[in-house]
Amino acid sequence: MFAITNAQRREHKLPPLLRSQPIAVAARKHSLDMSKRGFFGHINPDGSNVARRLNNAGIWYVSCAENVAKTLSIINAHKGFMESKGHRDNMLDRSFTHIGIGVYRGSDGFLCITQNYIQAADTINVDSAAKFIEKKLNRKRVYRSRSYLRRQATIDSIATRHSLKMLKSQNPRIAQDFGNINASASAFHFVTPRLNDIFGDAKMIRYRGTRMGIGIAQGSSRKYGNGLLWITIIIAE
């Protein structure tokens, strides 16, 4: 089915999809679930849709879609997808980059088939991203006659702990814990798909201090969206 799908995309002058094993595992679990629990659709009896299932599987993506079929053969499933506008649109969506396909044959002989498509989110190099933030933030602070901030590894560690806690709790408003920073300090938290979004925080740029730490985590959120950066910047005197 993977080959047939990409052949169809080539006919429409679209880039081929990359096969993703983690997405395929999530897709097969949905196919198995449909067969075992006797339902058919995109939302299972627990209320989970494709976005939630991919999030739970730790898949990093910007957008996603799903095709499902229950039929006796792969060819019949593909034919049905191409004859349905919604399914066809998913298969021929230029923005999608990866696919995972899960197939399970039930005791009734029918194949439950799930195709999961995603537009992959670019993963960033955390060290490079932190250096970018450090450089741009200091440039803005100096321009506004604020002190230059020196990064410290101990504060980076605390900031990273904050970001990981935000991601795990899916909440950017966590309690501030500055560990062994023996000075006045403040943490600035951001959940955003783009690094440049954080520099609109005037309070962070004006905040009095001489040291800082930067923590970055990457992950999606049911509330805030997919392909996100969870950023903490701690500024201390």
Image (cartoon, rainbow, N blue to C red):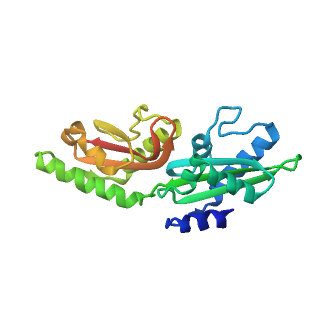
Of 48 and 107, nearer the camera is 107
Q: Is residue 135 left or right of residue 112?
A: left
Q: How many marks overall? A: 0
Q: Is residue 81 left or right of residue 211?
A: right
Q: Is residue 168 left or right of residue 205?
A: right
Q: Is residue 217 left or right of residue 188?
A: right
Q: Position of residue 170 (x, y in %)?
A: 49, 36
The answer to whether residue 231 is visible is: yes
* Quarter containing the N terminus: bottom right
Of 19 and 3, nearer the camera is 3
Q: Residue at coordinates 31% horizontally, 58% vertically from top-left?
A: 131
Q: Residue at coordinates 36% horizontally, 47% vertically from top-left?
A: 155
Q: Residue at coordinates 79% horizontally, 52% vertically from top-left?
A: 104
Q: Position of residue 183 (x, y in %)?
A: 29, 38
**Is 37 drawn above or below residue 11 in the view shown?**
above
* Quarter containing the C terminus: top left
Outermost residue, right side: 107
Q: Quadrant of residue 7?
A: bottom right
Q: Position of residue 221 (x, y in %)?
A: 50, 40
Outermost residue, front side: 83
The answer to whether residue 237 is visible is: no
Of 28 and 91, nearer the camera is 91
Q: Position of residue 64 (x, y in %)?
A: 54, 48
